Image: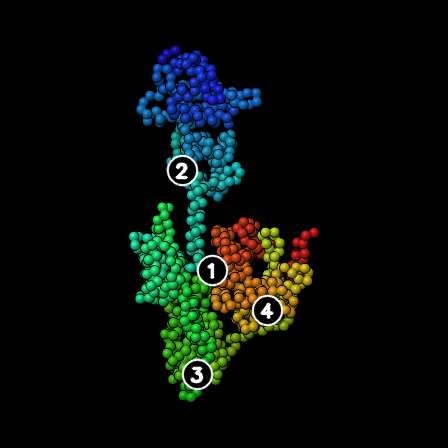
């Protein structure tokens, strides 16, 4: 045998500890070691340091591979040479299958000469892939694995044989496969390097987010995609938590400011939308400024000194301050600041929470003013309007002068509220009020009649031409849109005008005539002025027909109720029913409330309709009680116009007595936007309901802005998630719904989901602690008899 030709048929045996127990002559020749020299010594004596690591990994994997393994290591051979070596390992097994050693066949290759870098570079790929921290793989043009490491087997939960038969795309989430296929095509066709975030799907169905990178390499005449993957589950979870916290900050009704400390100063880094709403400043206008930039000059010096001292001492503080909004308006705010520490315990930031308490301050200071003025706009209210109009008529009669009564109704005001939010609607009303006051004389009166209706009394008019010029000035004031949160809201109005003494002799006649003229304007075109004439009365016929039809429906008993079951998640039992109104129209069939309630609300017919609904609901509750279901309450929807009527609560108490019902048999369902419209009235009503013993349910929670402090003061028994929030669960709205459920529970209120229509909606709500639900998924609204049968069927046999 020549010096360059290594011996053949080199075979030795080891025990289960890796100690050499048998040694043949070719081994002695190859390693220049006799059996006496090697027997009893560790087999790693034969390897370079890198080869010892490869042996350790291969030996550990051998227990999982009864068919053996192949290792590529560098060997210390005769003459001090280092040769490439291929070790073929065959496990030695006892009769019971226990491994007690290993037979090793050695084949050698070329010498390992050259520099250290060259020797390391010649390390076989198969010897190091299992050492890599992530997944490693090589894929051929057919998309099949030809090489991989054990991490890929662990992540996919597949055996080596299964991976060898698997296409790479089969491991990817279905929706992501087109993007991955396109990336693989780019790698093979253009040689581009690619990075993708995808979800691996393991055998058990577990989805694992991975960051994949890969490139094209040529091997032995073929082209392969070599790539690696890193598990990014922790990073993905962290990102989701950050997004949830950011949404919570954005959804808060109180203003939130985050400021960074710089020596003895602080700089604003973040404000939420509520801060923008309260102050009128957009986020980009305040970033980088000091938090005290809105301070009202010369005011609250003691409180501001307390703030500075607290920041210098790195402590929290609470004060009440007067600041200036962007439009120059003075407002009161309750400010609480809290220090934020870094990981070393150093205070680096402050969080400030702003609550606008202007209304409370003004209500306390100007109680007498509020008796005769509208709290939102500051204009004269209905009481003061009638007094001023009577005075103007008395003077006009004495001086033989004219008095113009102008009624203004904003066009599409409901659309403004629905599109921009109720806060935007309030801003529009206040801006319109200021413009109207600027367009008339000090001797004239501008009043807010109700909602979006304004009435002007133009006293002592010398001529009709003078009145025309004043009315035209009023109309022009609506040509300029209203700015709100960097957006422009177009505002139009329909204007009706009546004149004393031509169109009426009393205040009531003049307002009624102006109202008819205004409705005539709405019918013939928006944003226009119409003076009263006798033939305008026909313009109200359609309105009167609907009103009369509804009153006839009451007389003919065409209105009836269906009952929507409300079900508990805990045991899937009916816990109550919501009464839903229907109209059995003699010509149009059964009508849902959306077809007629708006007209009923406007005409006032909603009040007797609401009384009829209460009668039917109480009768149904009494029917359930007589059948042994006294603990199943009936929920009745009540509109703002109904519960603001005098004697509403007395009427409610009378019905409970008449039908011999305990107060808990009924629940009143009130919309949150109606309650917020007049917070003091809402709090008073909630308190009276508690005294009476009737539960309050707050409807449409999550549909718009909500003052959580006000909601807590209501102390309702439950809140009902808005149907839009439930529908959004199918389109990425889970975080908002979970936050609303948590808020309801934190306020000690049960949470009910409305309009649940799908199994995924139900599963999400159940897993996130929602208490009850109602909707088509469980049952359509039922007649009274069917509703009672449903309760009877859920009784234990």
Mark sitting earlier along the chain (4/3): 3
- As helix, strand or loop, the secondary structure at mark 3 comes to helix
Q: Of 502 and 132, which appears nearest the observer?
A: 132
Mark sitting earlier along the chain (3/2): 2
Going 42% across and 52% down the picture, which residue do you hit?
246
Residue position for label 4: 652
Going 61% across and 57% down the picture, which residue do you hit?
575
- Residue 332 in the image, given as x and y percentages of width and height: 38, 65
In this rendering, the answer to whether 465 lies above or below 51 is below
Q: How far apart are marks 3 and 1 (CA)?
A: 44 Å
Residue position for label 2: 213
- As helix, strand or loop, the secondary structure at mark 2 comes to strand
**Can you tell which quarter of the image residue 141 is in?**
top left
- Residue 74 in the image, given as x and y percentages of width and height: 39, 22
Q: How far apart are marks 4 and 3 (CA)?
A: 39 Å
Between label 1 and label 2, give the one nearer the viewer.
Answer: 1
Going 38% across and 61% down the picture, which residue do you hit?
319
Residue position for label 3: 391
Q: Of 497 and 401, which appears nearest the observer?
A: 401
The image's mark for residue 708 is 1
Q: Are marks 3 and 1 in contact (CB under 8 Å)?
A: no
Q: Do the residues labelled 3 and 2 touch (CB within 8 Å)?
A: no
- Residue 296 in the image, given as x and y percentages of width and height: 33, 65
């Amino acid at each position: 045998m020549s010096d360059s030709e290594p011996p053949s048929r080199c075979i030795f045996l080891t025990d289960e500890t890796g100690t050499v127990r048998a040694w043949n002559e070719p081994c002695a020749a190859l390693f220049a070691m006799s059996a006496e020299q090697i027997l009893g010594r560790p087999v790693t004596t034969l390897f370079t340091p890198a080869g010892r690591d490869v042996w350790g990994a291969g030996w550990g994997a051998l227990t999982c591979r009864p068919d053996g393994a192949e290792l590529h290591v560098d060997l210390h051979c005769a003459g001090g040479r280092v040769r490439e070596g291929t070790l073929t390992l065959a496990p030695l097994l006892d009769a019971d299958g226990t491994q007690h050693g290993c037979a090793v066949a050695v084949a050698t290759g070329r010498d390992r000469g050259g520099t250290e870098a060259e020797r390391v570079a010649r390390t076989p790929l198969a010897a190091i892939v299992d050492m890599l921290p992530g997944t490693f793989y090589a894929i051929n043009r057919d998309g099949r694995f030809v090489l991989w490491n054990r991490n890929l087997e662990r992540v996919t939960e597949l055996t080596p044989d299964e991976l060898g038969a698997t296409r790479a795309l089969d491991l990817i989430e279905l929706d992501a496969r087109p993007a991955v296929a396109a990336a693989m095509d780019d790698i093979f066709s253009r040689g581009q390097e690619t990075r993708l975030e995808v979800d691996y799907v393991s055998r058990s169905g577990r989805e694992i987010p991975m960051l994949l990178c890969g490139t094209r390499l040529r091997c032995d005449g073929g082209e392969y995609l070599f790539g690696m993957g890193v598990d990014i589950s922790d990073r993905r979870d962290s990102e989701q938590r950050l997004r949830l916290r950011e949404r919570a900050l954005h959804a808060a009704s109180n203003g939130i400011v985050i400021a960074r400390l710089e020596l003895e100063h602080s700089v604003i880094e973040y404000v939420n939308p509520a801060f923008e709403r309260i102050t009128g400043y957009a986020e980009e206008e305040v970033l980088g400024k000091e938090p005290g930039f809105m301070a009202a000059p010369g005011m609250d010096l003691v409180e501001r000194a307390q703030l500075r001292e607290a920041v210098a001492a790195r402590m929290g503080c609470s004060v009440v301050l007067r600041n200036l909004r962007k439009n120059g308006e003075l407002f009161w705010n309750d400010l609480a600041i809290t220090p934020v520490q870094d990981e070393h315990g150093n205070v680096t930031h402050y969080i400030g929470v702003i609550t606008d308490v202007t209304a409370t301050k003004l209500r306390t200071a100007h109680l007498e003013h509020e008796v005769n003025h509208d709290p939102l706009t500051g204009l004269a209210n209905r009481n003061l309007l009638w007094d001023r109009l009577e005075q103007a008529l008395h003077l006009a009669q004495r001086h033989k002068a004219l008095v113009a009564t102008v009624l203004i109704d904003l066009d599409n005001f409901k659309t403004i509220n629905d599109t921009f939010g109720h806060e935007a609607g309030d801003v529009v009303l206040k801006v319109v009020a200021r413009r109207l006051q600027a367009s008339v004389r000090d001797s004239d009166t501008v009043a807010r009649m109700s909602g979006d209706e304004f009435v002007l009394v133009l006293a002592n008019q010398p001529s009709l031409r003078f009145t025309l010029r004043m009315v035209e000035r009023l109309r022009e004031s609506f040509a300029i849109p209203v700015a709100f949160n960097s957006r422009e809201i177009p505002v139009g109005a329909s204007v009706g005008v009546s004149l004393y003494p031509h169109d009426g002799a009393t205040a009531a006649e003049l307002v009624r005539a102006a109202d008819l003229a205004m409705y005539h304007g709405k019918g013939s075109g928006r944003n226009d002025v119409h003076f009263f004439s006798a033939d305008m009365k026909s313009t109200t016929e359609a309105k009167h027909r609907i009103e009369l039809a509804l009153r006839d429906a009451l007389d003919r008993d065409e209105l009836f109720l269906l009952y929507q079951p409300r079900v508990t998640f805990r045991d899937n039992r009916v816990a109550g029913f919501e009464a839903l109104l229907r109209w059995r129209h003699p010509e149009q069939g059964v009508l849902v409330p959306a077809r007629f309630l708006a007209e009923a609300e406007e005409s006032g017919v909603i009040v007797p309709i609401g009384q009829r609904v209460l009668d039917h609901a109480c009768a149904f509750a009494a029917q359930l009680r007589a059948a042994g279901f006294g603990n199943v309450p009936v929920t009745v929807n009540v509109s703002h116009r109904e519960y603001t009527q005098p004697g509403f609560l007395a009427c409610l108490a009378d019905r409970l007595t008449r039908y011999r019902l305990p107060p808990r048999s009924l629940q009143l369902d009130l919309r949150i936007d109606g309650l917020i419209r007049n917070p003091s009235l809402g709090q008073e009503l909630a308190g009276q309901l508690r005294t009476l013993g009737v539960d309050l349910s707050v409807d449409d929670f999550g549909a718009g802005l909500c003052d959580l402090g006000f909601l807590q003061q209501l102390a309702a028994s439950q809140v009902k998630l808005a149907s839009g929030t439930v529908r959004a669960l199918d389109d990425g709205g889970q975080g908002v719904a979970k936050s609303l459920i948590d808020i309801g529970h934190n306020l000690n209120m049960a949470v009910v989901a409305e309009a649940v229509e799908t199994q995924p909606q139900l599963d999400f709500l159940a897993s996130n602690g929602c208490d009850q639900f109602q909707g088509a998924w469980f049952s359509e609204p039922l007649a009274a008899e069917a509703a009672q049968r449903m309760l009877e069927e859920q009784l234990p046999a």
